[in-house]
Amino acid sequence: MPLEIFLALAGFSFVSSITPGPNNLMLLASGVNYGFRQTMPHMLGIAGGFAILLGCIGFGLGQLLERFPTAFMVIKFAGGSYLIYLAYRIATSGPIKKGKDKGRPMRFIEAALFQWVNPKAWVMAVTAMATYTNPSRYAPSVVLVVVIFTVINLPSVACWTAFGTTMRGFLSNVKRLRIFNCAMAVMLVVSLWPMLR
């Protein structure tokens, strides 16, 4: 892969991974409510699930969706519906608790499977494979896109969790936490708009 394409891919990976979207907003809320260590399986699930989604799109699923655009629309709207449900769960979550009653963050497998109904993840994956793969060396370029995205994605999503964790003290006040959780829920729903048009 030429250096300029590599740098463009790295830039696209970083910008699309670090900007607000369903994954990052949920990690921010999880960092606030559960802390960094408890949210690690969620972060790893995002990185692993997205890598698998990228690979599947690169090795054939992307062409299948081009032939059946209705299937892509179904995925987008199913994902949107699930995100609205998650927004409701965030908005109605209670105060930060300790011990057995504090609830739990998303597990690794849940976060990995969530990538398959996350509209932003699909848009990122389809765009990356359509733009940055090399037809003359297709398989190695698909693998390279997956590796670069994974290496950049994990620290990017970790930043959102870390930011949420640093806000835990400030948000230990029930009123402030409720405002924060409602704001995160609204932002999660708003993040769907560009992807569902």
Image (cartoon, helix red, strand yellow):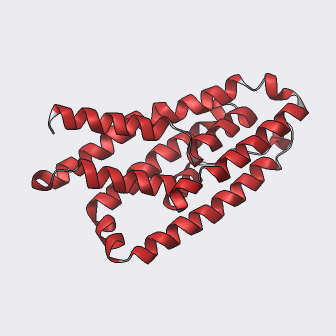
- Residue 194 in percent (x, y) is at 53, 54
Above or below: residue 38 compared with residue 112: above
- Residue 162 in percent (x, y) is at 61, 27
Q: Residue 70 or 44: which is nearer the viewer?
A: 70
- Residue 35 in percent (x, y) is at 69, 31
Q: Residue at x 90, y 34 (%)?
A: 175
Residue 86 left/right relative to 78: right
- Location of residue 171 by image quarter: top right
Q: Residue 190 or 47: which is nearer the viewer?
A: 190
Above or below: residue 73 compared with residue 99: below
Q: Residue 173 or 179: which is nearer the viewer?
A: 179
Residue 109 left/right relative to 140: right
Q: Which residue is drawn at 58% across and 36% down?
A: 40
Q: Which residue lies furthest to the left in this view?
A: 136
The count of marks equals 0
Residue 104 makes an appearance in the image: yes
- Residue 80 in percent (x, y) is at 60, 62
Q: Residue at x 54, y 40 (%)?
A: 43
Above or below: residue 126 compared with residue 132: below
Image quarter where the N terminus lies is top left
Residue 135 left/right relative to 112: left
Residue 96 makes an appearance in the image: no
- Location of residue 179 by image quarter: top right
